[in-house]
Amino acid sequence: MVQIFGMFKSRLKEKLIFASMNPLNSRNKIVKNIFFLSLALCTLLAIAVTSVFFLNKNKEAAAPVHKPNKIFTVIVDAGHGGRDEGARKGNIKEKDITLAIAKQVEAFGPQYGLKILLTRHTDTFMNPLHRVAFALQQNADAYVSIHVNELKGYSYVSGMQVYVSNKNPDFNQSRSLGSAVAQNLGADFKVSPRLQQRSENIFVLADNYLPSILIECGFITNPNDLKMLTDSSKIQLIAKQVLTGISAYARHSVINQYAVQIASPSSHHKTGYSEGTRIKKGRKKNSKTV
Ligand SMILES: [Zn+2]
């Protein structure tokens, strides 16, 4: 046994010596090595390509366009608050009307399949940056700011207006949302047939990172609008039509895209800074807020 093994060992040795001396065999070795190296490279390449593919796929899934597995979430921003009263007629203040409308939108939101988050629930001051930052934190799908207009000395001016901003990165989406809301509000109220845009920026529209609109729900300086804005059943109706509009937008079923016009700067009141219209020094005539 030991002998046979010894013979086998010596033959193997001979074979190995022969092989190492044979140039043909070493060429085969090189070919073999190249083959295995190529195989390893191909495997690495395949792993790399697969990883890139899956990474891209995850990126696509994280895109913020109407996340399908999530309830459509809307930030509803009650304009003004705290020391910033907004428009005022006697004891009636814009900040209270906007909060009342926002709370109704929040209350009825689930009936429309929408998740509504308010920027404020109480009479507190918030600057525009905080409002936009809040919206960003919530990973919301849209932003709707509620306001009331005023035009002192022109009590006959009445009706609602919906504002958008072409500075918003989702301007076209904002336009669709604004059109849907304006159209539905128009079923029960007097609403401008065009969307409005300010020549000066409105912070919560222009510097926001999601489709954003601002609704002026009527003029506090107009007797009929004031009556409507202090009637709880009308406030509920405003809230429901706003929700119907948002819901149509969320379902991608906006039919009419409204035209956008530059709003006359005289149609806004000056007080308040909740929407953050940029006030330029030395140009007080243009320092309007909503
Ligand atoms: Zn306002």
Image: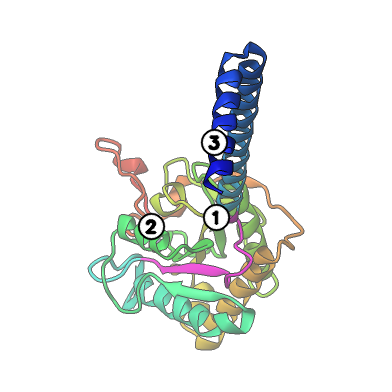
Query: Would you say 175 lies left or right of 208 here?
Result: right
Quick one: which residue is furthest to the bottom in this view? 233
The mark nearer the N terminus, 2 or 1, is 1
Q: Which residue is mark 2?
A: 132
Q: Which residue is mark 1?
A: 62
Q: Which residue is mark 3?
A: 9
Q: Amino acid at mark 1?
A: Ala
User: Which quarter of the figure has residue 274?
Assistant: bottom left
Instruction: Return the x and y of residue 53 as percentages of the image width and height.
Output: 62, 44
Query: Would you say 110 lies left or right of 251 here?
Result: left
* Mark 3, other Cα within 10 Å: few <14 / some 14–19 / many ≥20: few
What residue is rendered at 63% in x and 11% in y? 23
Q: Amino acid at mark 3?
A: Lys
User: Dot 3 lies on which element?
Assistant: helix
Quick one: which residue is furthest to the top in this view? 23
Query: Would you say 126 lies left or right of 109 here?
Result: left
| Nearest-to-viewer mark from 3 and 2 | 3
Query: Would you say 273 lies left or right of 252 here?
Result: left
Instruction: Return the x and y of residue 185 as percentages of the image width and height.
Output: 64, 70
Instruction: Return the x and y of residue 116 as percentages of the image width and height.
Output: 50, 75
Residues in magenta, as a range: 61-79
User: Dot 1 lies on which element?
Assistant: loop
The mark nearer the N terminus, 3 or 1, is 3
Q: Amino acid at mark 2?
A: Val
